[in-house]
């Protein structure tokens, strides 16, 4: 049979082939793009579930000092100057989570992944006490996993990672429908995995 006499390929067949190619391409490159994300959340899921293994990494430091009284008095303390003084003097990092000015005392709290610092300032004397807590590298990773005190930029990254992993899962499921010999067994395994998760939740989660 010559090429000219060959029957045209139905549109549905062309669409199926094209869909299979696009799904395979998307699944491959999305998987590579999300490799670091999957590895990070897999490892930190384990460390987060066993945080007690790394409980001994906490390190606490205490400092004291003074600052100009004129920064502290008045209806509104000089927040920027106070915060920058603490950062510069003691290498404090993290975002300012709380700043309170009460009668005779100002308290400033800094928070970051695996990190906290709390300063208590005497408004009349200008003296302060500062406690800095570093919970170790694993605690930093665990807080990044949860998005705790990591800032809006990291929150966007978590959302983007969730979308990326969803697309990887869906394209993998779509590819299964084009592999006829493995489709039934693959769907059975997928259903079994979901069923096991449901049974564990039903049986063992209080």
Image: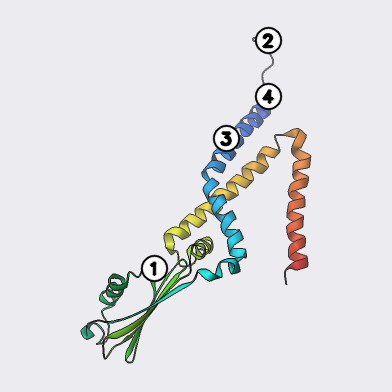
Label 1 and label 2: CA atoms lie apart by 73 Å
For this rendering, which residue is in front, 161 or 52? 52
- Badge 2 crowding class, 10 Å Cα cut-off, few under 14, some 14 to 19, many 20 or more, is few
**Is 193 left, or right, of 140 in this rendering?**
right
SS of the residue under disc 1:
loop
Measured along the vertical axis of the image, is residue 21 above or below residue 103? Answer: above
Label 3 and label 2: CA atoms lie apart by 33 Å
The residue that appears at 61% across and 31% down in the rendered structure is 21
Circle 2 residue: 5
Circle 3 residue: 25
Q: Percent position (x, y) of residue 77? A: 27, 82
- Badge 3 crowding class, 10 Å Cα cut-off, few under 14, some 14 to 19, many 20 or more, is few
Label 1 and label 4: CA atoms lie apart by 61 Å
Circle 4 residue: 10
Q: Percent position (x, y) of residue 48? A: 58, 64
Q: Earlier in the sequence, mark 3 or mark 4?
A: 4
SS of the residue under disc 2:
loop
The residue that appears at 73% across and 48% down in the rendered structure is 190
Q: Nearer the viewer, mark 3 or mark 2?
A: 3
The residue that appears at 35% across and 83% down in the rendered structure is 129
Q: Are marks 3 and 4 in contact (CB under 8 Å)?
A: no
For this rendering, which residue is in front, 180 or 106? 106
Q: Nearer the viewer, mark 1 or mark 3?
A: 1
């Amino acid at each position: 049979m010559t090429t000219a006499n060959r029957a045209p390929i139905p549109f549905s067949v062309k669409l199926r082939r094209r869909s299979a190619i696009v799904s395979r391409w998307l699944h491959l490159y999305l998987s590579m793009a999300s490799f670091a994300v999957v590895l990070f959340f897999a490892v930190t899921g384990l460390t987060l579930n066993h945080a007690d293994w790394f409980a001994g990494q906490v390190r606490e430091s205490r400092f004291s000092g003074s600052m100009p009284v004129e920064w502290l008095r008045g209806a509104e303390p000089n927040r920027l100057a106070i915060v920058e003084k603490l950062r510069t003097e003691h290498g404090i990092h993290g975002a300012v989570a709380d700043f309170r000015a009460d009668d005779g005392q100002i308290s400033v709290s800094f928070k970051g992944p695996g990190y906290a610092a709390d300063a208590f300032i005497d408004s009349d004397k200008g003296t302060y006490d500062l406690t800095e807590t570093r919970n170790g590298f694993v605690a930093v990773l665990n807080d990044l996993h949860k998005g705790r005190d990591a800032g809006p930029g990291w929150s966007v990254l978590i959302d983007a990672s969730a979308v990326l992993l969803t697309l990887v899962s869906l394209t993998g499921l779509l590819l299964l429908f084009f592999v006829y010999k493995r489709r039934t067994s693959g769907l059975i395994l997928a259903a079994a995995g979901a069923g096991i998760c449901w049974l564990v939740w039903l049986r063992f989660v209080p």
